[in-house]
Image: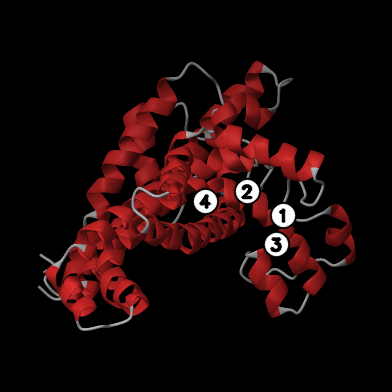
Amino acid sequence: MGVKHYIIRRLLLLIPIFFIVSLITFVVVRVVPADPLILWVGPHATAEQINRARIELGLDKPLYEQYYRYIVGIFHGNLGISFITHRPVSTDIMTFLPASLELVTTAMIIGLVVGLPLGVISAKRKDKIEDHSSRLMAIGGVSLPTFWIGMLLQLLFFKYIGILPVCGRLSWAVKVSYPITHITGFYLIDSLITGNWVAFQDAAAHTILPALTLALYPIGLVVRMTRTCMLEVLGEDYIRAARAYGIPEKVVTYTYALKNAITPSLTTLVLSFGYSLTGAFLVELIFNWPGLGWYASKATIGMDYTAIVGVTLLITLFYVLANLVVDVIQAYLDPRIVLK
């Protein structure tokens, strides 16, 4: 089967997956004893106003009819109206998603740049102090609570050292004096494109702590996976033969061994992208980062049904696409893998 046919078949599987996820989420959020109409009409609304809003939003219909109308709306690009913001959920998602993607992408880059060399060093220095230190860091990265790490970094770098901002994407002074022209929604990219260096430096400084907090988990995964694969590859016959021919150790390690050991690490990193997108919820709350996690947290607290289902479907889409990307990358890097 060709790559194009494989991708098309996997994308078609999104349809039943979306149906199942949307149905489960749609039913679960509606069995919770809460009335989101209070958010829509306000806490001081009369019973008549609440009933009018219920009819206007279609909440007076049976649950199966509400779900049918919601599914039909999805195929027309309509994810419903948020009870909190009174705006289309699709508009809200497009507003908050770039901030989350910028944060998660930065965290993934940190995870790759830091985790890969540490994994190689850990394998090369097996059972030495470097190996024990890397393994300890990896275990801590995947085990320690994200919210605890985030607050610890805030205390260390903001309160005690005072070199990094504690929250937000930009400081108020920069927002007023050096506003960023929104092109992609990624502050780092938009400020670079427009040559707004003051805003770029400020945005980069605000990104460091939340991105580092979010990156600790993928760093731990990449270190452990790279170490395991490198130990296995370094014991292969062709590695011993390369050393016997007098090929420099750096070439053997980074050209021959790492090339064959990097595929599982990249696979793990891509799969952790979807996990990090959901894990960013707590990080965004702690650092007051106005992203999708912040939006979803507010929707969950306020029982904003349409926003919760919309965000869930988006996360599902990212998970499915991440798995698809992993399969294609594996087939590209390893010719022995056949896409079926």
Q: How many marks?
A: 4
Q: Is residue 84 visible?
A: yes
- Residue at 72%, 72% in the rendered image: 191
Check disc 1 and give the amino acid type: His
How packed mark 2 is, by other alpha carbons closer than 10 Å (few <14, some 14-19, many 20 or more), is many
Alpha carbon distance from label 3 to label 4: 15 Å
Q: How is the image coloured?
A: secondary structure
Query: In whole angstroms, how far apart are the C-alphas of marks 2 and 1?
Result: 8 Å
| Badge number at residue 210 | 2
Residue 4 percent location from the top left of the image: 20, 75
Q: Are marks 3 and 1 in contact (CB under 8 Å)?
A: yes
**Residue at mark 1:** 206
Q: Residue at x 35, y 74 (%)?
A: 254
User: What residue sits right under mark 3 in the picture?
Assistant: 204
In the rendering, at what x and y percent does residue 14 appear? 27, 54
Q: CA distance from mark 4 to mark 2?
A: 8 Å
**Label 3 is placed on what type of residue?**
Ala
Q: Which amino acid type is marked by label 4?
A: Ala
Q: Earlier in the sequence, mark 3 or mark 4?
A: 3
Residue at 20% across, 83% down:
245
Q: Secondary structure at mark 4?
A: helix
Between residue 119 and residue 329, name the one nearer to us: 119
* Numbered badge on residue 215: 4
Q: Regarding mark 3 in the picture, which secondary structure is present there? A: helix
